[in-house]
Image (cartoon, grey):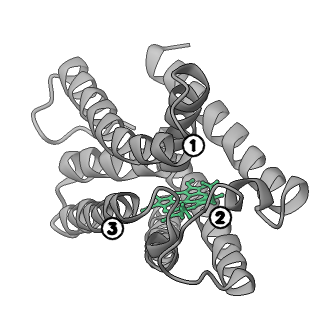
Amino acid sequence: MNKRKIWFRLLAAVSSAFIIYALVKNFIIDPDAAAFLGYKTGLKRELKLPQWLNVMYVHVVFACLAMAAGLLNFSNRIFEKSRKFHRINGYIYLLSVLIVILTSGYMAPYATGGKISSMGFNALNILWMIITTIAFVQIKRKQIVKHRNWMIRSYAFCFTNMMIHLITTLFHYGFNMSYPSSYTVGIYGAIALLLIIAEIVVRTIDRFQGNAGTARQA
Ligand code: HEM
C-alpha cells in the first residue's frame, strides 16, 4: 500500500470515528447539551433553549455531512470511477458548509467564554466562507491543483469542534484553567492549528508530486 493510501485511510478512520462520536453524543447521550450548557454563565443575551437546541442539531448534522462529503471527494478511486459523483458530492459539501456557517452565526453570540469567543467564531465563519469560495472558484477556472489545495484548507475546518475540545480539555484538566477560558483558547488555538496543519499537508503533497500544476492527487 502506498503512503498516500495509508494517509487517506487514517483520515477516513479519524473522520468516521468523530462523525459517530458527534452523532451519538449529541443525539443519544446528551441531547439536551446539559453538560455543555452548564458552563454558560453570565450570558449577555437570553438563550432560548428549544431554539438553540434545534439550531445545534441542524449544525451537528450538516457538520457531519460536510465531514463525510469532503472525505469522499479526497478519494482518488471514487474520483476516477465517477466524476459526476465528485461534482454532486462537491455541491453537497458546499451546501453543508453554508448551513454550518449559518447555524454557527446563530450560536456565536451565546458562545461559551463570552464576547472574545463569539469574535473567534465569527472570524472563523468568515475565513471558512472565503477559503471554500476560493476552492469553488478555482475549479470553475479549471485550476485543479489550486482547487485541491484550497479544498484541503477548507476541509481542515471540519475538524474545528474536535480540535476545540482537545485544546479545551488540555487547558481545563491539564493546566487547571476554567472551562470557559479554556474554550476560548480552544477556539483561537483550533483556527491557528488547523490552518497550519492544512498548510503542511498542501506543501508536503506539492513537494512529493513536484507539482507543475496539472496532476491531480487526492
Ligand atoms: C464536524 C464539524 C463540527 C461539529 C461536529 C460541530 C458540533 C458542534 C456541537 C456539538 C456544538 C455544541 C457544543 C460543543 O460540543 O462544543 C457546537 C457548537 C458550536 N459550533 Fe460547531 N461543530 C463543527 C464545526 C463547526 C465550525 C466549522 C464552526 C464555525 C465555522 C462551528 C461553530 C460553532 C459555534 C459558534 C458553536 C456554539 C459554541 C458555544 O455555544 O459556545 N462549528 N458545534
Badge 1 or badge 3: first in the primary sequence: 3
The answer to which image quadrant residue 50 occupies is bottom right
7 is higher (above) or lower (below) than 98 = above
Q: Are marks 2 and 1 in contact (CB under 8 Å)?
A: no
Which residue matches tag 2?
A: 60
The location of residue 6, given as percent across then percent down, is: 54, 19
Give how far apart the Cα atoms at labels 3 and 2 are. 18 Å
Q: Is there CB contact under 8 Å for labels 3 and 2?
A: no
Q: Is residue 78 visible?
A: no
Foreground label between 1 and 3 = 1
Mark 2 or mark 1: name the one nearer the start of the chain. Answer: 2
How many numbered discs, if any? 3
Say what secondary structure mark 1 lies in: helix
Residue 18 location, quadrant: top right
Mark identifier at residue 122 = 3
The Cα–Cα distance between marks 1 and 3, rounded to whole angstroms, is: 20 Å
Q: 25 or 3: which is nearer to us?
A: 25
State left or right for residue 107 relative to residue 139: right
Circle 1 residue:
179
